[in-house]
Amino acid sequence: MVAFHDILLCFRNSITADLHTHIALSQTCRRLSHLYIHDDEFWQFVCFGAGFGRPLRRGGVEFGNILTWRRLAHVLVNHASHCEIRSCREANAELAEHRSRTFQSPFHPGHGPADILLHPLYFYLHFSGPCAEPSPDTLSVLLTHLPTFPECRASQYGPLCSHPNASCAFATFPPMQSLDFQDAHGNTYLSVQNPDGCTILDVNRALAALIPNELAALEIVLAHYQDLIRTSGLSKHQWADMVSKERGFLDDHEYPFLQELVAQA
Ligand SMILES: [Zn+2]
């Protein structure tokens, strides 16, 4: 005889991957809720099917209970309901058709050479103008790590990690556990790894790490900070203190050259 629990399980597992639907179902009754709440692997499966992974935290810091897959699913659905940037709100719309056609086993990111497609956000965030350059543009990458004006937070990528949907979108289709980026001469200039599948934020952070710690970058960033401080009505220290607490959905973001701003005479 089939137990009611097994029927519910079969029902849950047969539904096409859709974050909204699963979240709604998980809240309909106690038994379904129990089924969902203790199965984080299933939530990973649902996120994966919707084209989302979980970026690694800085310094390899463990997630613990900060961001379980179930929590991430809620964060993604909640953010999509108020973000004003379409490419974040509907981060995977363009690749949805590919997924539905070719995803046979939507749980294991691939690795090794494959015929992969880069997510449009990779270009949108990291290049300025037409993608004629062999490597992403330093200023574009820098801007995705800086804060923006408070009134622009829902409408600009500033910083990218305050937009979980864009951040968690897989950087490629199909998702890959490791990615090597090569320049025009075929030399690898960037390697990105994430056992759960490389996301846009994983690639974005790896690109930012390539930016030389030089005067040119420092001047751009400090000028940007000064603009924000001027309109905030706060002192430099008050502003820096406030911004440093806004660490994104992984609670790990570090703003470039913030120490240098504070240390400035
Ligand atoms: Zn967003």
Image (cartoon, rainbow, N blue to C red):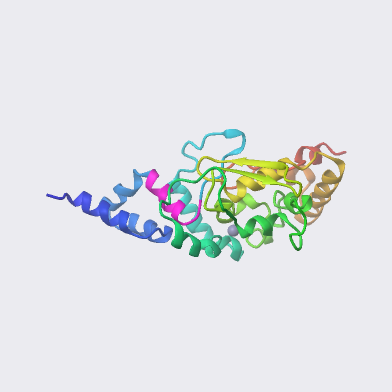
- Asked if residue 84 shows in the view, the reply is no
Q: Main secondary structure of the magenta part?
A: helix
Answer with left or right where residue 140 lies relative to residue 253.
right
- Quadrant location, ligand no. 1: bottom right
Q: Residue at x 50, y 40 (%)?
A: 66
- Asked if residue 3 shows in the view, the reply is yes
Tell me, yes or no, whether the highlighted magenta stretch contains residue 42. Answer: yes
Q: Which residues are magenta?
A: 41-52
- The x, y position of residue 244, in whole percent, is 68, 42
Q: Residue at x 87, y 42 (%)?
A: 215
Q: Residue at x 27, y 51 (%)?
A: 9
> What number of labels is visible?
0
120 or 232: nearer the viewer = 120
Q: Residue at x 39, y 44 (%)?
A: 41
Answer with left or right where residue 41 lies relative to residue 76.
left
Residue extending furthest toward the left: 1
Q: Quadrant of residue 28?
A: bottom left
- The x, y position of residue 191, in whole percent, is 65, 40
The C terminus, quarter of image? top right
9 or 102: nearer the viewer = 102
- The x, y position of residue 236, in whole percent, is 79, 45
- Answer above or below: position of 86 versus 209: below
Tell me, yes or no, whether the highlighted magenta stretch contains residue 187. Answer: no
- The x, y position of residue 131, in whole percent, is 74, 59
